[in-house]
Amino acid sequence: MKKYLFVDLDDTLFQTPGKCANEQDLRPVAYLKDGAACSFSTARQRALFDLMQREMTLIPTTARNRDAMSRVDLPFSSYSIVDYGGLILEPGGALDYDWTETMRVDMERAFGGLKEAMRVIDDYAESTGQEGRARLIEDCAIPFYVVVKDPQKKPEVLERLEREAVGPWIEAEGRDFFIHRNGNNLAVLPKTLNKARAVAYLRQRIQAEHGEIMTFGMGDSKSDARFMAACDYAIIPGGSQLAALTVGAL
C-alpha cells in the first residue's frame, strides 16, 4: 500500500532564525526573492524528513504561493498544495486544471467579502493608529485571502484587531469567512478555501490512480488540524500552536 504524507512547511519542516535561536546545526532551506536565506531546518527536522521520505511520498500542503514554494530547497517530487489549498500543482509544476477552475469560481463569489474584510481592517487601523494594513493575496490572478501583519510584531495588536473589528464583522456579516491567526499573521479566508478540501480532492485522485492508500497529515497550526483530520494519521510537532491546543491541554 502506498503511503503519502501531506505536510505543512513553515514552522513544521523549517522556520525563521528567530524561532530556532538555540539550535546549533542550522541549514538554509527557503529563500527570499533576492536569494537571501530566510528559513532554516534543524538537525532533527532533517532527520525526520529523511525518515519520512524513505517510507512515504511527501506532498507539501502550505499557505505559500507558487513563487514562494519554488524557493523552498527540499527534494519534493510529487504534487504540491499551495495557497492554503487554493492551487494544486502537478509533479512537474503545472496546475491541476480542474481544481484551479473550481477555486476560481469559488473565489469570485468570495471576492466581495474579501474587499469588505480589507475595509474593516483598514478602517480600524485608521481609527486606532495601527500601522498594519490589509493585503489581498492572489496567485494565478485569483484572489484567495486577506492578511495583515503588525510591523512591530506585537501580538496584542493583532489580538485587539481580531477581538474588536474582524471577529465582530464575521459574526455579523462575514459568516462565510474565518480567521486564522498564528504568530504575526492574521488572515481572513473564505470557508471554501482550506487545505482539507484540497487534500480530500487530491487523495481521491491518487486513489483512483493507485488504489487504496494510507495517508498522514503533519502541521503545526490550528488551521492545519482540518487537513490532518482528513488523513488516516496525524503528526504534530512539539512546541507548536497545535500541540498546545491538543496534547498540551491534557
Image (spheres, rainbow, N blue to C red):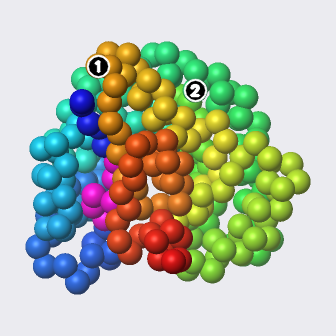
Amino acid carrying mark 2 in the image: Met
Q: Position of residue 95 (x, y in %)?
A: 39, 22
Name the disc covering residue 21, or none.
Answer: none
Amino acid carrying mark 1 in the image: His
Image point (72%, 46%), residue name: 177
Q: Which residue is mark 2?
A: 103
Name of the residue lying farthest toward the right: 172
Closer to the camera in the image, 134 or 191: 191
Q: CA distance from mark 1 to mark 2?
A: 25 Å
Callout 2: helix, strand or loop?
helix
Residue 250 visible, this orientation: yes
Closer to the camera in the image, 151 or 51: 51
Image point (88%, 54%), residue name: 172
Residue 223 highlighted magenta (yes or no): no
Q: Quadrant of residue 105?
A: top right
Near mark 2 (Cα within 10 A), the count class, few <14, some 14-19 or many ≥20, is many
In the rendered view, would you say 95 is above or below 142? above
Residue 212 relative to residue 149: left or right: left
Q: Position of residue 11 (x, y in %)?
A: 36, 63
Q: Nearer the viewer, mark 1 or mark 2?
A: 1
In the rendered view, would you say 31 is above or below 198? below
Q: Which residues are magenta?
A: 7-15
Name of the residue lying farthest toward the bottom: 22
